[in-house]
Structure formats: structure tokens, C-alpha cells
Image (cartoon, helix red, strand yellow):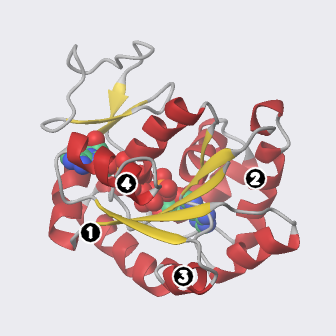
Amino acid sequence: MKLIMLGPPGAGKGTQAEFLSEKYGIPQISTGAIIRSVIASGSEFGKKLKDLIDNGNLISDEDVLKLVKERIEEPDCANGYIFDGFPRTIAQAEALIKMDIVIDKVLSIELSDEEILKRLSGRRECASCRATYHIEDKPSKVEGKCDRCGGELICREDDKPETIKHRLAVYYESTAPLKAFYKEKGLLVTAHGQKLLEDTKREVLKALGELK
Ligand code: AP5
């Protein structure tokens, strides 16, 4: 199965992709997480990406495609994968078609801008395995420590309120048009993220045809 998670920053793409990755036994491919690990490596390429991502701008289509191509060649992708935050432009979606990658479904998670601001300011992320938490809605068992690997929980650089607003503007301009692109191809399904975590999971499963 090959699935794309679409939606504004903070809609819950990563949280639902994590859950679906366990359910289907296929990897979650978060381009944001890949970019953050390139930055953490301290390479020249990483330095170039850091400025863009910290300010809430997209990295170039060329750079993101290079990273995605490398990732999907890894053996764990043989039975499919979940793209989380990719594609993010029409050019990236067209590149997937040129690469003969057949997508089964595109799941768009919808959430209001107000809720996004609230969610992202309370988000914490594991510095090691990148699992996602929320200080109120999805707290870790031990404060500041990841349930999965015991890593340190941190705030992301791009989760400052001004940067969140800019990321939203970039989303509406460059990424939201993908909904019409995939709707026209009959691949788009929608779930509302404006709910408690367990209710959102149910909405997601319904949208994917796994629940009535
Ligand atoms: P990326 O890391 O992909 O960030 P994003 O798309 O902005 O999405 P987020 O990770 O912020 O949010 P999410 O929707 O995954 O929500 P989450 O599940 O964490 O990308 C970062 C940057 O990388 C981009 O700005 C860009 O610069 C670059 N980049 C990445 N891909 C690119 C590409 N293809 N092309 C070019 N550049 C690219 O949830 C948010 C919070 O809410 C969490 O705390 C969570 O616990 C909580 N939560 C989730 N669901 C619920 C719920 N139902 N109820 C209550 N709380 C909830």
C-alpha cells in the first residue's frame, strides 16, 4: 500500500501516519523528519536546509525529491509506505507520476487555523526517534522523556507562533492545490482532525474504508 498524508502543518499527519504505519506494517516517510536529520548531521547540505525549514519555507523540489528517492530504495519500503508531508507542491506530485509510483489513496486531514496554533505550541518531539507528543492531549508517561525510546522531548524550532503563521500561508499557496489535483484523479479521501485523538483515528479508518 502506498498512502499520502496531506493537510496543513499541525493537522495530525505525523500522529496518524505513526498509527497507520504500525497498523499496516509499512514505514512512515516524513520528509520533515528526514530534513531535520540531515540538518542534525551538520553537513553543508544540512546548513543550506536549516535556514529554510527554521523559517517555515519549503526546501526546493529538487532537494526533496533526491531525499525521497534515496529513502524509498531502502528495503523496508518493499511493501509500501506512508508519505507524511510529501508531496507538497504540484511539481513534486508530478515527479511521483514520472517515477511510475502508483499511489493507492491520499488522505487529507482538515483542521482550523486556530486549532493548529494551539496544537503546535503544545507539541513535543523526541530528539532521537521523532515520536510526537502534546503536553495536554498526548502527554508522555514520564515528563520530557519519550515513551518509545526514552529520548529527550524537545520543541521544534519552527513551532514559534510567527513561523506557524508563515507555514500556514505556504501551505495554502503551495500545498492545498494538491487536494484538487488528487480529487480529480479519484484518490482523495478526507478526515476531520478537529477531534480527540481516538475520534480522529476512527475518522481516519472510516476515510480509508477500514471502518463503517
Ligand atoms: P513537517 O515536519 O512535515 O511539518 P508539517 O507538515 O508542517 O507538519 P507538522 O509535522 O508540523 O504537523 P503534523 O500534521 O504532522 O501534526 P502532528 O501529528 O505532529 O515539515 C517541516 C518543514 O520541512 C516544512 O515547513 C518544510 O520547510 C520542510 N519540508 C517537509 N517536507 C517538504 C516537502 N515535501 N517539500 C519541501 N519542503 C518540505 O500533530 C501536531 C500536534 O497535535 C502534536 O503535538 C500531536 O500530539 C497533537 N495532535 C495530533 N492529533 C491530535 C488530535 N486529534 N487531538 C489532539 N491533539 C492532537
* Image x and y of residue 79, in percent: 76, 38
* Disc nearest the viewer among 2 and 4: 4
Between 134 and 25, the one lying in front of the other is: 25
Q: Badge 1 is on which residue?
A: 162
Q: Earlier in the sequence, mark 3 or mark 2?
A: 2
Q: Please tell me how crowded label 1 is: few (under 14), some (14-19), or many (20+) other residues with Cα within 10 Å.
A: few
Please tell me whether mark 3 sits on a helix, a strand or a loop. Answer: helix
Where does label 4 land, which residue? 206
Q: Which of the labelled discs sits on residue 149, or is there none?
A: none
- Ligand 1 near label 4 (Cβ, under 8 Å)? no
In this view, 126 is above or below 101? above
**Residue in view at x 77 percent, y 44 percent:** 71
Q: Decide if residue 139 is on the left or right side of residue 70.
A: left
- Name the disc covering residue 67, or none: 2
Q: Pointers 2 and 4 in contact (CB under 8 A)?
A: no
Q: Give the CA separation, mark 4 to mark 3.
A: 17 Å
Q: Residues within 10 Å of mark 3 (few under 14, many from 20)?
A: few
- Of discs 1 and 2, which sits in the foreground? 2
Q: CA distance from mark 1 to mark 2?
A: 28 Å
Q: Please tell me whether residue 1 is drawn above or below residue 191 in the rendered image.
A: above
Crowding at mark 2 (Cα within 10 Å: few <14, some 14-19, many 20+): some
The image quadrant of residue 165 is: bottom left
Residue under pointer 3:
183
User: Residue at the spot x=45%, y=29% of the render?
Assistant: 127
Q: Marks 2 and 4, how far apart in space?
A: 32 Å
Residue 142 % position (x, y):
22, 13
SS label for mark 2: helix
Separation of disc 4 and disc 1 at Cα? Answer: 34 Å
